[in-house]
Image (spheres, rainbow, N blue to C red):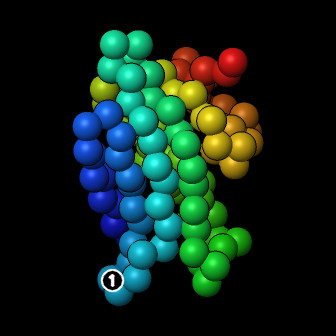
Amino acid sequence: MKYENKQTGNGGIITLSNDTDEIGRLTYTVFPEEQRLVISFVLVHRQFEGRGMGKYLVEESIRFARDNNWKVYPHCSYARSVMKRMNDVDDLLLYR
């Protein structure tokens, strides 16, 4: 599996793929002046559902945020539920 992070302006998409297919994607917006990354949406294509692929995408976005010293606001309800169950994200998790 490989990740690709395509940024355009303040937004971006992290895609997860195998050798032949896109498995899923996570969309985000960055607010650099606030040192914040907002996870907008997580999508896993139907044939890959139920294998933890969405969690892998959320984990990759967390790595990206940590690399840039940003906090993470999971606007997406799926991302929020994944992050609530993680033990090592309290230092960067934002809720409103």
Q: Which amino acid type is marked by label 1? A: Asp
Q: Is residue 70 among what the camera can see?
A: no
Image position of 74 (left or right of 5): right
Quadrant where the N terminus is found in the figure:
bottom left
Tag count: 1
Q: Measuring 71% from the left and 43% from the top, which residue is drawn there?
A: 77
Q: Which residue is tagged 1?
A: 19
Whether residue 6 can be seen here: yes
Helix, strand or loop for disc 1? loop
- 10 Å crowding of disc 1: few (<14), some (14-19), many (20+): few
Tell me where residue 67 sits by quadrant: top left
* Quadrant housing residue 40: top right
Could you tell me residue 21's position as x and y percent?
40, 82
Please, is residue 59 above or below residue 34 in the view? below
Q: Residue at x 25, y 37 (%)?
A: 9
Please tell me in which quadrant of the rendered image residue 18 appears.
Answer: bottom left
| Residue 80 at x, y percent in the picture | 68, 38
**75 w.r.t. 50: above or below:** above
**Depth check: 79 or 55 in front?**
79
- Looking at this view, name the residue that lies furthest to the front: 9
Q: Residue at x 61, y 35 (%)?
A: 74
Question: Quick one: quadrant of the C terminus?
Answer: top right
Left or right: where 27 falls relative to 46: left
Could you say where residue 86 lies in the image, as x and y percent from the top left? Answer: 66, 37
Q: On screen, 91 above or below 8?
A: above
- The residue shown at (60%, 21%) is 94
From the top left corner, tell me how far across and down residue 39 is, in percent.
Answer: 53, 39
